[in-house]
Image (cartoon, grey):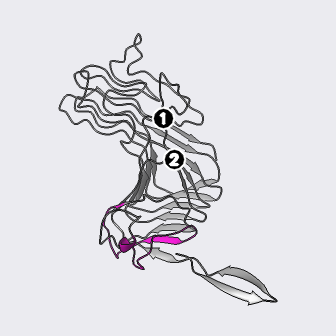
């Protein structure tokens, strides 16, 4: 929370802002950011504040407020999951740096959005993430794994037993006539969500991977995991979901970690969904 002081000089009044607050998560009351009691200083973060997750609490957390932090840090001794839910803008912006050295920063996706598809064939929409620099440390992740279309759903959703979902690649037993399990979208600037796998026409297949677009003009350093993998099958004869989309728009890429858009695990050998799409334009 920012504090202001009124200063008068020569019969004029001005407002001067003090430095941004450092807001540390303690998660004692609930999993919601919008509750002041969940923060060490009993105040919900405001625009420009420094947001920190450390060993004060590793409680899971939902970022259900619409502000633009000054910086975002998950320290190496934070081990929880921070989830960014669906919102109107689908834009996660930080004025400074995003540093994820511990735990997981997870982005939900909007499966109902048209995206780059059409009203008849929706491609869904993932998050655009904007920061000056981005770091994902060893053992940590930024991901949208399994946040795409549900089992058997999506433009390339699998249909029938052992049938895989498609996206960047085709799924097992794909159908050329109906388009089920087939590829869709574009290799350049991909934004579509991955499609669900299948089991007996509906249910039991893994969900598709989500979509992340990174707008980071400085350094993107991945020593941990940046991923939009499909979800694993929940049934003994089902297929996992297809991978989703990662688009790194600009900046410098470094690190020794993993960037992946893999399909989810299937329960039957040789029956898989397609991988997703990754475009590193930087």
Is 232 above or below relative to 69?
above
Front residue of this view, candidates 106 and 16:
16
Most foreground residue, 256 or 156: 156
Residue closest to the far bottom:
9
**Image x and y of residue 30, in percent:** 30, 65
Q: Residues within 10 Å of mark 2 (few under 14, many from 20)?
A: some
Q: Secondary structure at mark 2?
A: loop
Residue at 48% x, 35% y: name it: 113
Residue range in magenta is: 36-61
Image position, residue 156 (x, y; %): 41, 24
Q: Mark 1 Cα within 10 Å, few/some/many (few <14, many 20+)?
A: some
- Which of the two residues, 77 or 152, is positioned nearer the viewer here? 152
* In this rendering, position of residue 155 left or right of residue 81: right
The picture places residue 43, in percent across and down from the top left corner, at 44, 75
**Residue occupied by mark 1:** 113
Q: How much space separates mark 1 and mark 2, taking CA atoms?
A: 11 Å
Instruction: Locate residue 142: give its quadrant.
Output: bottom left
Q: Is residue 32 magenta?
A: no
Q: Which numbered disc flags the more N-terminal residue, 1 or 2?
A: 2
Instruction: Determine the secondary structure under disc 1.
Output: loop
Q: Residue at x 38, y 22 (%)?
A: 181
Q: Main secondary structure of the magenta part?
A: loop
Q: Which mark is residue 90?
A: 2
């Amino acid at each position: 929370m920012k504090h202001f002081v009124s200063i008068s000089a020569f019969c004029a009044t001005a407002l001067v802002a003090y430095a941004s607050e450092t807001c540390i998560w303690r998660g004692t009351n609930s999993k919601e950011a919008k509750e002041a009691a969940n923060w060490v200083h009993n105040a919900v973060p405001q625009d420009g504040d420094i947001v920190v997750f450390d060993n004060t609490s590793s409680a899971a957390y939902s970022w259900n407020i619409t502000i633009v932090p000054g910086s975002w840090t998950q320290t190496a001794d934070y081990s929880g999951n921070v989830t960014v839910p669906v919102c109107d803008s689908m834009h996660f912006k930080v004025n400074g740096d995003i540093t994820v050295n511990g735990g997981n920063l997870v982005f939900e996706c909007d499966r109902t959005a048209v995206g780059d598809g059409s009203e008849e064939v929706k491609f869904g929409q993932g998050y655009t993430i904007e920061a000056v620099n981005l770091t994902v440390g060893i053992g940590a992740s930024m991901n949208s794994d399994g946040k795409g279309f549900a089992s058997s759903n999506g433009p390339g959703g699998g249909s029938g037993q052992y049938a895989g979902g498609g996206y960047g690649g085709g799924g097992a037993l794909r159908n050329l006539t109906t388009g089920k399990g087939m590829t869709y979208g574009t290799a350049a600037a991909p934004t579509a969500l991955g499609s669900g796998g299948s089991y007996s026409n509906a249910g039991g297949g893994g969900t598709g991977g989500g979509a992340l677009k990174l707008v980071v003009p400085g350094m993107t350093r991945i020593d941990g995991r940046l991923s939009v993998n499909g979800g694993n099958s929940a049934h003994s004869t089902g297929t996992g979901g297809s991978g989703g989309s990662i688009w790194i728009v600009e900046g410098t890429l470094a690190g020794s970690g993993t960037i992946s858009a893999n399909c989810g695990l299937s329960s039957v050998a040789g029956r898989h969904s397609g991988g997703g799409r990754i475009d590193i334009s930087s």
